Image: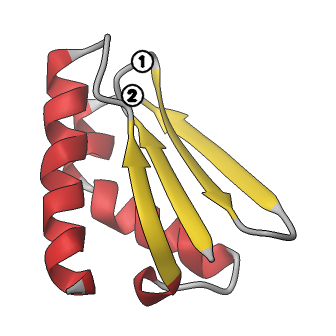
Amino acid sequence: MNKLIIDAAKNSIFFMIINKNNNYSITHENTKVNFDKMTILINDFLNSKGLNINDVTSIYINRGPGSHSGIRNSLSTIACLANILE
């Protein structure tokens, strides 16, 4: 069971993977460039831990409070990833 947490509503973009043995996290600067490539950042983070999107069983996002554009971008990214996981 691998849970992916995404928080882009604050000053940085934060990703975390939680599984029964370990927790891994990474942060990126909260910029438009990083918003535009959020799926690439997620994929790179998962790959760095020997995982891919199909290994993720649950995805959690911060829905606020925080930056409207960060929340909107997170939701759009998750909607895209959810279609891949179906």
Nearer-the-camera pick, 79 or 47: 79
Which residue is tagged 1?
10
Quarter of the picture holding the N terminus: bottom right
In the visual, does 14 lie left or right of 34?
right
Quarter of the picture holding the C terminus: bottom left
Q: Which corner quadrant of the image does residue 40 belong to?
A: bottom left
Residue 6 versus residue 83 in the image, above or below: above
Say which residue appears at 41% left-offset and 59% top-offset.
59
Q: How is the image coloured?
A: secondary structure
Residue 78 percent across, percent down from the top left: 23, 57
Nearer-the-camera pick, 44 or 18: 18
On residue 30, the disc is 2
Per the model, the C-alpha gap separating discs 2 and 1 is 8 Å
Q: Mark 2 touching mark 1, by CB under 8 A?
A: yes
Secondary structure of residue under mark 1: loop
Residue 70 percent across, percent down from the top left: 24, 28
Residue 16 percent across, percent down from the top left: 61, 51
Residue 6 versus residue 54 in the image, above or below: above
